[in-house]
Amino acid sequence: MTRFLFLIPLLLSIAWVVYLRMNGWSLRQGLRGFIYIAIVSGFIALMYSLLWWLTNQR
């Protein structure tokens, strides 16, 4: 399951590009959305890493 975690930011970014294009906005105008996606994805990765580290302690 964890090997597919890279799909989260990829799918969110693709969805954001589709949303921007459907509403006639440029990628530059949607830059803040990409920043939010990176922050949320980084937080998710950090939490999974923390949980993995905590469960592997002996």
Image: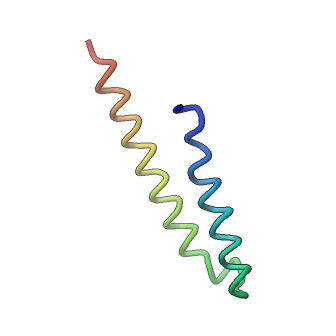
Colouring method of the image: rainbow
* Residue that sits furthest to the left in the current view: 58
Q: How many marks?
A: 0
Quadrant of the rendered image containing residue 9: bottom right
Q: What residue is shown at x 69% (from left), y 70% (from top)?
A: 17
> Residue at horizontal 73%, vertical 88%?
24
| Vertical order, 27 against 23 (above or below) | above
Q: Quadrant of residue 21?
A: bottom right
Q: Position of residue 28 (x, y in %)?
A: 67, 80
- Residue drawn 55% across the image and 41% down it: 5
Left/right placement of residue 1 relative to residue 52 reads: right
Residue at 66% of width from left, 76% of height from top?
19
Q: Left of 46 or right of it: where is 29?
A: right
Most extreme residue toward the bottom, as rendered? Answer: 24
What is the x, y in percent for residue 57? 28, 17
Q: Vertically, is 50 above or below 8?
A: above
Q: Is residue 57 above or below residue 5?
A: above
Residue 52 appears in which quarter of the rendering? top left
Q: Residue 2 placed where, x, y %?
A: 52, 32
In what quadrant of the picture does the C terminus appear?
top left
In the rendering, at what x and y percent does residue 55 appear? 31, 23
Q: Nearer the viewer, residue 34 or 15?
A: 15
